[in-house]
């Protein structure tokens, strides 16, 4: 279970990094008109909002899974001797 969560975290990390790089404005020149500036900003802002909501959703999922793993009782190992207190 923990290995599956680690793999899922890694896949999501790679995805969100790529998504964020795609959302970043990579323009090398300044826009000449206010309309062009607004258009650039609006298109990049939409993608950035989606990236933020994906990150918030992921953090919420991590929190729920973390609490679930912390609160569950460990399974007894088959064939293990019961724990005994040390002799005095």
Image (cartoon, rainbow, N blue to C red):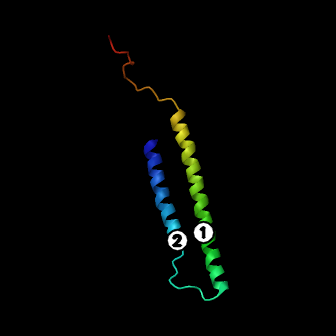
Secondary element at tag 2: helix
Name the residue carrying label 1.
Answer: 47
Residue 24, compared with residue 35, is above or below; it is above
Q: Earlier in the sequence, mark 1 or mark 2?
A: 2
**Residue 21, image x and y in percent?**
50, 69
The answer to whether marks 1 and 2 mark residues whose Cβ atoms lie closer than 8 Å is yes
Depth check: 3 or 88 in front? 88
Identify the disc placed on residue 2. Answer: none
Left or right of 34 in this view: 22 = left
**Residue 26, image x and y in percent?**
51, 77
Res 54 → quadrant:
bottom right
Quadrant containing the C terminus in the rendered view:
top left
Classify 10 Å Cα crowding around label 1: few (below 14), some (14-19), many (20 and above): some
- Can you name the residue that lies furthest to the bottom here? 32
- Can you name the residue that lies furthest to the top here? 88
Residue in view at x 53 percent, y 32 percent: 72
Identify the disc placed on residue 22. Answer: 2
**Residue 9, image x and y in percent?**
48, 52
């Amino acid at each position: 279970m923990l290995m599956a969560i680690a793999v899922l975290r890694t896949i999501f990390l790679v995805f969100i990094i790529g998504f964020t790089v795609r959302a970043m404005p990579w323009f090398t020149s300044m826009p000449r008109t206010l309309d062009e500036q607004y258009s650039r900003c609006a298109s990049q802002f939409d993608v950035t909002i989606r990236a933020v909501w994906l990150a918030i959703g992921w953090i919420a999922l991590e929190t729920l899974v973390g609490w679930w793993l912390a609160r569950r009782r460990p399974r007894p190992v088959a064939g293990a001797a019961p724990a005994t207190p040390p002799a005095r």
